[in-house]
Image (spheres, rainbow, N blue to C red):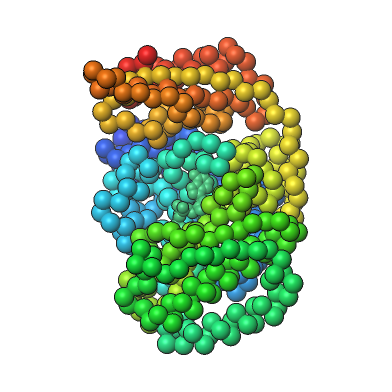
Amino acid sequence: ANLMKEPPVITTETITVGGQTYTKDAFSNVTPTILEKTTRQLHLIPTHPVAIIKDLIASTFPDFKHYDTFSPVVTTKENFDDLCFAADHPGRAVTDTYYLNEKVMLRTHTSAHQLKVMTESDKILVTADVYRRDEIDASHYPVFHQMEGAQLFDAKTAVEDIKALITRDLAAAGAASKAIQTTDTTVITPENPKQAAHDEAAMLAVADHLKHSLNLMIRRLFSHEKDLQVRWIDATFPFTSPSWEMEILYQGKWLEVLGCGVIQQDILKNAGKPDKIGWAFGLGLERLALVLFGIPDIRLFWSQDERFLKQFEPSKIQKFKPFSKYPACIKDISFWTPEKFHENNFCEIVRDVAGDIVEDVHLIDEFTHPKTKKRSVCYRINYRSMDRNVTNAEINELQEKLREEVVQRMKVDLR
Ligand code: FA5
Ligand code: MG
């Protein structure tokens, strides 16, 4: 039985999700709208673009063990501590993460399962839904899907082993190995350093194999696109060093599609594999699907509209045929911010009140009063439904509700 299919229940004292009940405390900030998403499991619906991408990518890592049914409820130890996050890392904040209580949360990334699966295998993939309190726009959504990949090598023979693997791959890939240009101008520096525990040649070989594997994956996935532009940039993660991100030029902007790096040796020690060295990556499945299927807005993945769902077939890439865009309705809201104002808290309230009818939220104006030093902000909310016309009366009602909730929940003064 798939326990994630059970409807979640929130009472004043407890939260029940996936057949388990958790006691609430001062950290609890998951909302019913978010918890409902845990039942959707888009990556397990074979005709859904998220699952199609998942299968296509997995097929480029054929002998990797693939886990895709882990519960989204994890401990803070799994999501943060095991991955070397500092005690005061901003990702732990209640403004960024959905907590069931102080110790239990919705995973913010598939890396939460790294340690566990690396004890079981040297070549792993993990696909799952992940949850973040984030901004709202066409490429950000509070629930999305990631695929984690990791490969471990014997530290002593990594250099020769990897050389043989890359030679074999390039021969097998043939023309696919050259179709798309990938630009990499990154260099190892003290800002993005080699770990003290690592032999330099072994680390460089692992880094080479990592980028080679991901470049090849992208070339296979986009084999039909000649003009795709891909680049590597430096990045920072607590659980890898050195670290990088891959970006794809999409609609004139660089879109970040994945983060990766050489795994912190302490994690391999904790996984009982101190003599290995390895790489890991985490990629956003919706981000790749936006580019691959030409899906214009990340909210569409959650659409229950047949005009969306009926367009796709398992293991097939086909361009999304947009159905007519319904008109937008724009509303502004201005208020004096309280001392501890955080934009994500505001976005959360917007989402709670309006759900998927909100397309984006932008700060359009702010100023600080010269005498009182109070800060005033003005947010513009773009309301638009994916599958129907919204009426002005309906949006006015939502906006009124939003104004009330903002006052009540953030204790702000509206202007
Ligand atoms: C991570 O989550 C790391 N765990 C990735 C990683 C794994 C690094 C293993 C090193 C080793 P990041 O927060 O950058 O990194 O997210 C990874 C990807 O998820 C992004 O590149 C992007 O493609 C996608 N993503 C991030 N936030 C959102 C969002 N709000 N909506 C949709 N996709 C998102
Ligand atoms: Mg990132």
In the displayed structure image, the side of residue 175 where residue 137 appears, left or right: left
Would residue 392 be seen by someone viewing this image from the given angle? yes
Total residue callouts: 0
Nearer to me, 346 or 193: 193
Quadrant hosting residue 261: bottom left
Residue 322 lies left or right of residue 82; in this view the side is right
Q: Position of residue 339 (x, y in %)?
A: 26, 28
Q: In the displayed orientation, state which residue is furthest to the left.
A: 372
Quarter of the rendering containing residue 252: top right
Q: Quadrant of residue 168?
A: bottom right
Q: Is residue 65 visible?
A: no
Q: Position of residue 110 (x, y in %)?
A: 46, 57
Q: Which residue is at 73% across, 54% downward?
A: 317
| Residue at left offset 32%, top offset 77% | 197
Q: Residue furthest top?
A: 393
Is residue 194 positioned above or below 159 on the image? above
Q: Position of residue 59 (x, y in %)?
A: 65, 66
Nearer to the camera, 17 or 400: 400
Residue under the image location 56 percent in, 42 percent down: 139
Rendered residue at 74%/30% (across/down): 324
Please state, as top left, top right, bottom left or bottom right, where the C terminus lies in the image: top left
Image location of residue 266, percent across then percent down: 32, 71
